[in-house]
């Protein structure tokens, strides 16, 4: 079975594909030029081979697999456990794709660059010849993915890196990373077009990490479905009634339990609510939870308040389970487990550039039964 067919089989049979989350300790500093240039050269050849042998869709699927993404970073000589693997590897992929001109592009990046994602995406989509509708869909996916991992999945990590990779046919993968200021850890989130029937319902189903958080509100979980519906109903009740309910729960949560059943184990209502956002949402009357989340001003505090209220008033429980569930080829930048072997890296780059050896090498490194 080919990699592509295996991914599609996973979606059909068990509702998941290899996309998810990875936790990484924060590292400072920059990739040295001598290493970055080699990472780009080697990465470019690997991407070229995958596209030539398996196609653009398969490249996007592999980038959507956190284990494969991590392995690619290791193969290119970067730290296996560093948060920098995401930002540096994203930059490598961007430059490699621009030089290859293979019908795939990457938009976004770290910090300020992530804020310019819509502009970059639009420009590159136009260059690839995507029509207006496909470009509009990609812009919405980019926006919703960042909003979901910041506000709908509340795991303590704030998104600071966002990138979307897409093909000229409109297939896409999102790779973004958040930071936990308390634990000094970073968490990477992967999305693919195959894993998102609904953008707010378990969009990243396969999880990889080495740390599980205790305080989590996962409104993307299927078990939070009733809570999502109840949260939407609360918005439709109007700002006036919501104010009264919030006030009662905030100042007297225990007083509600004799009438409404057992209160949630953890009931910490946000101190501040954006009531203007509530009024806007009430006036716009969103048709579903995804539309509610996409509205301006609907952020983590309001979604948490709605969720807790829905649990207390309607008994609609939300998931508080963290949805979260690496080998070297040339060494690592920090000398772990050993310094990067530059000569060997250069030799492999030349081997991969040789079309004569490409096919044989691929059959050994990437078997058909992936």
Image (tube, grey):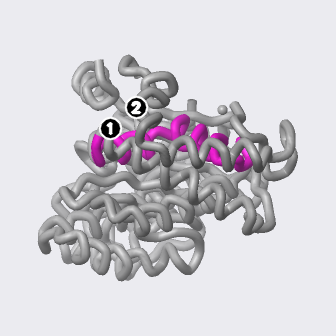
The N terminus appears in which quarter of the rendering? Answer: top left
x and y, in percent, of residue 160 in the image: 58, 67
Q: Is 63 in front, or is 256?
A: 63
The number of callouts visible is 2
Q: Is residue 219 visible?
A: no
Q: What stretch is highlighted in magenta?
A: 55-81
Q: Is 100 in front, or is 317?
A: 100
Drawn side of residue 46 relative to residue 192, left or right: right
Tell me the tag on residue 53: 1
Quickly name the residue at label 2: 359
Circles 2 and 1: CB atoms closer than 8 Å: yes
For the residues labelled 2 and 1, the Cα–Cα distance comes to 8 Å
61 inside magenta stretch: yes
63 inside magenta stretch: yes
Secondary structure of the residue carrying numbered label 2: helix
Tell me what residue is drawn at x 69 percent, y 35 percent.
Answer: 329
Tell me the quarter of the picture where residue 22 sits: top right
Q: Can residue 135 be seen in this view?
A: yes
Q: In this view, does 306 lie above or below 116?
A: above
Tell me the quarter of the picture where residue 116 sits: bottom left
The answer to which of marks 2 and 1 sits earlier in the sequence is 1
Secondary structure of the residue carrying numbered label 1: helix
The C terminus appears in which quarter of the rendering? Answer: top left
x and y, in percent, of residue 349 in the image: 59, 48
Tell me what residue is drawn at x 39 percent, y 62 percent.
Answer: 100
x and y, in percent, of residue 265 in the image: 59, 37
Tell me what residue is drawn at x 34 percent, y 65 percent.
Answer: 101
Tell me the tag on residue 358: none
Tell me what residue is drawn at x 49 percent, y 55 percent.
Answer: 44
Tell me the quarter of the picture where residue 143 sits: bottom left
**Discs 2/1, front:** 2
């Amino acid at each position: 079975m080919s990699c592509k067919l295996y991914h599609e089989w996973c979606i059909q049979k068990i509702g998941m594909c290899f996309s998810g989350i990875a936790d990484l300790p924060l590292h400072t500093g920059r990739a040295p030029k001598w290493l970055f240039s080699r990472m780009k050269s080697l990465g470019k050849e690997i991407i070229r081979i995958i596209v030539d042998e398996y196609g653009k869709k398969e490249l996007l699927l592999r980038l959507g697999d956190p284990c494969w993404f991590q392995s690619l970073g290791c193969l290119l000589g970067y730290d296996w456990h560093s948060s920098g693997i995401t930002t540096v590897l994203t930059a490598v992929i961007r430059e490699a794709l621009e030089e290859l001109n293979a019908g795939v592009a990457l938009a976004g990046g770290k910090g300020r660059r992530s804020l310019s994602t819509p502009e970059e995406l639009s420009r590159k989509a136009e260059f690839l010849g995507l029509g207006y509708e496909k470009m509009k869909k990609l812009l919405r996916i980019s926006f919703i993915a960042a909003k979901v991992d910041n506000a709908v999945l509340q795991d303590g990590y704030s998104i600071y890196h966002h990138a979307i990779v897409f093909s000229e046919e409109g297939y896409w993968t999102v790779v973004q990373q958040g930071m936990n200021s308390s634990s000094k850890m970073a968490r990477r989130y992967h999305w693919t077009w195959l894993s998102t029937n609904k953008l707010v319902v378990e969009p990243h189903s396969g999880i990889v990490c080495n740390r599980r958080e205790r305080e989590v509100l996962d409104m993307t979980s299927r078990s939070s479905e009733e809570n999502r519906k109840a949260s939407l109903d609360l918005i439709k009740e109007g700002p006036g009634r919501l104010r009264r309910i919030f006030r009662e729960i905030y100042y007297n949560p225990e007083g509600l339990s004799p009438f409404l059943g057992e209160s949630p184990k953890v009931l910490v209502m946000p101190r501040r609510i954006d009531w203007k956002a509530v009024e806007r949402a009430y006036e716009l009357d969103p048709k579903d939870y995804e539309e509610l989340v996409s509205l301006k001003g609907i952020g983590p505090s309001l979604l948490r308040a709605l969720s807790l209220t829905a649990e207390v008033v309607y008994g609609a429980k939300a998931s508080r389970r963290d949805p979260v569930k690496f080998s070297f080829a040339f060494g690592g930048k920090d000398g772990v487990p050993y310094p990067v072997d530059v000569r060997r890296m250069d030799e492999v780059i030349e081997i991969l550039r040789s079309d004569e050896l490409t096919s044989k090498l691929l059959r050994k490194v990437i078997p058909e039964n992936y």
